[in-house]
Image: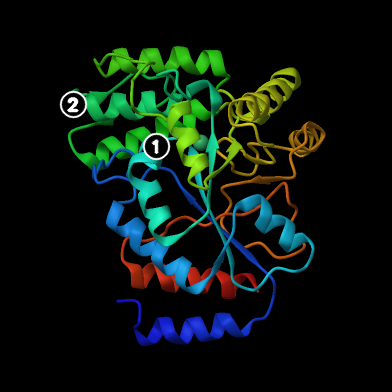
Amino acid sequence: MYHSGAVQILRRLSERRRVASLHVLVYHRVNDDRDPIFPGVPVDVFARQMEFVGRHFTVRPLVEAVEVLRRGEATDNAVAVTFDDGYMDNFTHALPVLRRFGIPATVFLATDVVGTGRILWHDRVFAAFRETTASELTGFGPLPSFSLRTLDGKLGAMGRVLAFLRRQDDLIRSQWIERLARRLRVEDRTVVSGLMLGWGEVKAMQAAGVAFGSHSCSHPILSRVNLERVREEIVESRRCIEQQLGMPVRAFAYPNGRPGDFDATTKRLLAEAGYTCAVTTTAGVNGPDQDPFELRRGQPWDEDLATFAVKFHLSRLASG
Ligand SMILES: [Zn+2]
């Protein structure tokens, strides 16, 4: 229970700082699959977290929340809920919860995979490690050999492989993933129906009050592709969503989103293309002076609501 003494004290402390702030939560998948390779937030956990933020905070769509913050009119308890990538379970599992608690969320779509059956490159890697029965991974690029006999071994190897792949150019990365699948003796599927949202679901979510932003077209690391490609990813994804939904797209989520995955040029191109804000995956809460093209976000830290609540309040205190 989150009505424990510690949470009450933290809540009172964090409510006493009357500094305008915006706390942006980032989710990817919501489901009960208990997949250790790419864990989703279980549906009942997500429901408890949404009930908590809905009860104690002012939750707004991201773009509106950023505008209010910049005008200096934000309350000290503003929250925005966001989802990256556009997984189908955002529609099947998250949407009913968002509706139940009246939470306005923003979903960032990578437009190449919406309604096409195609999947993002990291999901090809997840599938390879999920499905493999190989006992080890050897001879993969410059990486050492890894034992895959235990889940920890698999997760450790996958972390190193993902870090290596993030440093590669897009085309080369795809070839490396094909090579990975061969090494792990699994089929490399680039099309998996039902994993990502289609435009029908996106439109139904829009009708239910969900907002949409761009997460690029193909989810490249923007600082690792050439300028023309960056511009195309930023402009074309926005045009595509606007055409489908008939509403302006103002928010962008950087693929991967860590420092170094975007730069000053990326931010300039976003502003030129008509975006008004962009979110990273750097942890923290945003004050009125935060660069709107470098907004921090918090993870849904813990399945236990008391721990979630403590971390939520602590991150606000730490930011003030
Ligand atoms: Zn992403």
- The tag on residue 135 is 2
Residue occupying the point 33% across, 15% down: 188
Name the amino acid, label 2.
Answer: Ser
Q: Measure the C-alpha gap from mark 2 to mark 1.
A: 17 Å
Q: Is mark 2 within 8 Å of ligand 1?
A: no
Residue occupying the point 72% across, 61% down: 68
In the current view of this chain or complex, which residue is farthest to the front? 207
Classify the position of the C terminus by image quarter: bottom right
Name the amino acid, label 1.
Answer: Gly
Labelled pair 2, 1 in contact (Cβ < 8 Å): no
Q: Secondary structure at mark 1?
A: helix
Query: How many numbered discs, if any?
Result: 2
Q: Nearer the viewer, residue 267 or 259?
A: 267
- The tag on residue 277 is none
Q: Is mark 1 within 8 Å of ligand 1?
A: no
**Colour mode of the rendering:** rainbow
Classify the position of the N terminus by image quarter: bottom left
On the image, the x and y values in percent for residue 308 come to 40, 67
Image-quadrant location for residue 18: bottom right
Badge 1, how many Cα within 10 Å: few under 14, some, many 20+?
few
On the image, the x and y values in percent for residue 217 come to 58, 24
Q: Secondary structure at mark 2?
A: loop
Image-quadrant location for residue 99: bottom left
Residue occupying the point 26% across, 19% down: 184
On the image, the x and y values in percent for residue 305 come to 34, 68
Reading the image, the residue beneath label 1 is: 159
On the image, the x and y values in percent for residue 19 come to 69, 76
Residue occupying the point 64% across, 74% down: 76
Q: Is residue 76 above or below residue 135?
A: below
